[in-house]
Image (tube, rainbow, N blue to C red):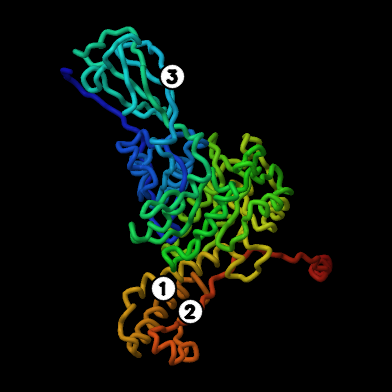
């Protein structure tokens, strides 16, 4: 094109740079439109570390159809709502088995182009002919090129000089599309077969692959299945034999969902949340249960997706130390709802009732705030390190930090210099946390009584770490009293 003059162009608005933090590193399991990526097969059951929305889209694809592509709601929550990174995405939707056949049909060509209006189409499976009776197929990149539009639909553009450039219609004689409906809770749980791991079993690979420990596990759209909830809770401890983390679990808000032949427990009102939580088996001190769902504008989220992004953001804003509770913080939500979109408008008394069951919700206090401090272990467990979600996370984080910091000391000579080095360096770091108001106490001791000669001979040394994270100020009371003396004095003056 010959140009003479002044011209302008526009590009999509760039997202704000996300704040980075790994204490609350989210490992998110679900389904994604991997057909939109350059390597759909390579995006299956492979942990993908993403630092931006663009990286996430390149890694697993993106769609606004969050019921079918569940990872996308977390991608949106992290990069568009809370602007936090990095995250690790694990897609289990496999193009080789979770697929359906496209109907064979002629498509009308307009301006040498037509669109197959269906999400999930696998480009490599497409076969096009000029008519249904043609014996030979058209050749990609010679007769046509394929691309995806913003809706995830396949666009076929006929090439000048190709055999079909002036065709009025093109016949789709073969093709496949992703079929998310064939993914089940067993795919999310995953399996281990020799060196091949899938689904939640891949949590083991996070540290060996990326050198980072998981902070939060979640599977929005799937965690309301009892088997998935059980696996999420089980995977929070003994990661790689030593690390710990926490997870978010959703309580279903609609009936009719089944796990095999068993009905998934659900709650459509706050009074039935306890029964649903108990039936779901959400009881771990390493888990936080969420109810109901939430909306941001017109987009509907499983609450765990928003809570995961919010919690990681909160950590990142405070030197990557997970000492604050995510409760009573801006969630980014504009409403709470059931799966069918019915709005749920809780007042504080109702929200507190939900909290009393060991479940977190959201409350409209000049904007929707997360509301709840308890782990799923409450009310059975009242130990402060296990009841309060913030305290539980602080303990997991501190334990992981100790391992990561002193793994380099393993196999050193067990002498006084080693003991002093570990105790002194740990306490210097701990004093810094106390000075910054992150906790009331953080110290490490080497106690001789806990290190008998038999242990020393066998190469074992034990340190004792004392932690005092601050508990959340959940109940603040102001006592009002009529001051009769002040009234009397005022009248007498």
Q: Nearer the viewer, residue 462 or 434?
A: 462
**The quarter of the displayed image where residue 286 is located:** bottom right
Circle nearer the N terminus (1, 2) = 1
From this viewpoint, is residue 382 visible? yes
> How far is mark 1 from mark 3, CA to CA?
58 Å
**Which residue is pictured at 63% across the width and 55% down the height?**
281
* Vertical comparison of 410 with 57: above or below: below
Q: Secondary structure at mark 3?
A: loop
Q: Position of residue 146 (x, y in %)?
A: 30, 24
Residue 415 place in picture, x, y as percent: 34, 89
Instruction: Give the left or right position of residue 269, taking residue 132 as reference.
Output: right
Determine crowd level at label 2: few under 14, some 14-19, many 20+ residues with C-alpha closer than 10 A: some
Mark carried by residue 402: 1
Residue beneath the point at 48% across and 50% down: 309
Question: Which numbered disc covers residue 329?
Answer: none
Circle 3 or circle 2, nearest the eye? 3
The residue at the point 36 percent across, 46 percent down is 52
| Residue to which mark 3 is pinned | 103
Q: Which of the labelled discs sits on residue 465, or is there none?
A: 2
What is the tally of numbered marks visible in this picture? Answer: 3
């Amino acid at each position: 094109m010959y140009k003479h003059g002044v011209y302008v162009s526009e590009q999509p608005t760039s997202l704000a740079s996300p704040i980075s933090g790994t204490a609350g590193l989210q490992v998110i399991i679900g389904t994604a439109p991997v057909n939109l990526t350059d390597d759909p097969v390579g995006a299956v059951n492979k942990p993908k570390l993403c630092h931006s929305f663009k990286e996430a889209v390149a890694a697993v694809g993106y769609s606004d159809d969050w019921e079918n592509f569940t990872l996308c709601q977390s991608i949106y929550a992290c990069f568009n709502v809370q602007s936090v990174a990095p995250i690790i995405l694990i897609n289990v939707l496999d193009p080789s088995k979770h697929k359906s056949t496209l109907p064979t049909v002629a498509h009308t060509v307009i301006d040498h182009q037509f669109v197959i209006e269906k999400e999930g189409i696998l480009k490599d499976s497409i076969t096009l002919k000029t008519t249904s009776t043609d014996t030979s197929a058209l050749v990609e990149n010679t007769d046509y090129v394929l691309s995806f539009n913003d809706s995830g639909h396949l666009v076929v553009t006929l090439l000048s000089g190709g055999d079909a450039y002036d065709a009025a219609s093109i016949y789709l004689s073969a093709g496949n599309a992703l079929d998310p409906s064939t993914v089940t809770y067993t795919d999310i749980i995953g399996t281990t077969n020799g060196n091949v791991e899938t689904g939640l079993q891949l949590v083991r690979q996070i540290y060996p692959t990326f050198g980072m420990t998981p902070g939060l596990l979640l599977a929005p759209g799937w965690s309301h299945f009892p088997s998935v909830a059980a696996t999420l809770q089980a995977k929070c401890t003994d990661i790689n034999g030593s690390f710990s983390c926490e997870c978010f679990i959703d309580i279903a808000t609609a009936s009719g969902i089944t796990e095999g032949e068993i009905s998934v427990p659900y709650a459509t009102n706050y009074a039935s949340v306890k029964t649903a939580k108990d039936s779901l088996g959400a009881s771990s001190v390493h888990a936080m249960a969420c109810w109901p769902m939430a909306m941001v504008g017109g987009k509907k989220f499983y609450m765990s997706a928003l809570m995961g992004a919010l919690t990681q953001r909160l950590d990142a804003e405070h030197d990557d130390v997970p000492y604050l509770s995510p409760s009573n913080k801006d969630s980014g939500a504009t409403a709470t709802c059931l799966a069918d979109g019915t709005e749920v408008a809780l007042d504080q008394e109702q929200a507190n009732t939900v909290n009393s069951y060991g479940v977190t919700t959201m409350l409209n206090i000049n904007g929707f705030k997360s509301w709840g401090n308890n782990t799923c272990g409450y009310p059975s467990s009242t130990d402060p390190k296990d009841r309060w979600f913030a305290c539980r996370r602080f303990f997991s984080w501190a334990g992981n930090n100790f391992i990561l910091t002193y793994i380099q000391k393993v196999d050193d000579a067990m002498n006084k210099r080693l003991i002093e080095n570990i105790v002194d360096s740990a306490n210097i770091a701990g004093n810094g946390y106390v000075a910054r108001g992150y906790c009331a106490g953080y110290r490490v001791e080497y106690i001789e009584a806990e290190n008998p000669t038999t242990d020393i001979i066998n190469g074992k040394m034990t340190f004792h770490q004392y932690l005092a994270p601050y508990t959340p100020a959940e109940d603040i009371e102001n006592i009002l009293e009529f001051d009769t003396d002040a009234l009397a004095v005022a009248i007498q003056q």
